[in-house]
Amino acid sequence: FPTVIQLQVGAVLHIVNGDSTPHRIHANATIGLPHQAISMGQGEEYVGTVNQTGQDTLYCHDHGTGSGTMLVLVQ
């Protein structure tokens, strides 16, 4: 899981749960990436489309702040 990624407006972000532990992506929707409604099981994915410039910090909602934190920057 990268700690920082840079995307462009219109990019589609896919995060696949590659382990057997449930995960739910926490996002603030500041750049269009939604907060995931339910936890995803192994092999399931989070999909979000960036729709504006700015930044958002994503992490696993189930495991709390600082768990797999990723800063998404959009210029």
Image (spheres, grey):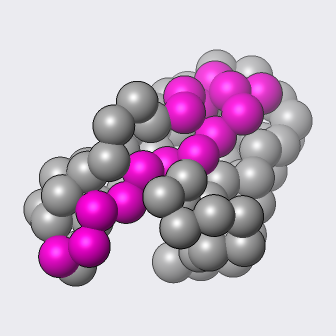
2, above or below 41, in the image: below
Question: What count of labels does the image hold?
Answer: 0
Q: Quadrant of residue 71?
A: bottom right
**Residue 5 visible (yes or no):** no
Magenta region, residue range: 20-35
Magenta span contains residue 24: yes
Residue in the image at 59% along x and 46% along y = 26
Q: Residue 20: x percent and y percent? A: 17, 76
Is 12 located above or below residue 18 in the figure? Answer: above
65 w.r.t. 28: above or below: below
Provide residue 59's location: percent of width, then percent of height: 61, 60
Q: Position of residue 53 (x, y in %)?
A: 82, 30
Q: Residue furthest left?
A: 43
Residue 67 quadrant: bottom right
Residue 54 in the magenta stretch? The answer is no
Residue under the point 68% across and 27% down: 29
> Left or right of 56: which side holds 43?
left
**Observer-nearest residue: 73 or 15?**
15
Q: Nearer the viewer, residue 9 or 42?
A: 42
Where is residue 33? Give x, y as percent: 58, 32
Dominant secondary structure (helix, strand or loop) of the stretch shown in magenta: loop
Task: Give the residue at x 26% y 51%.
Answer: 40
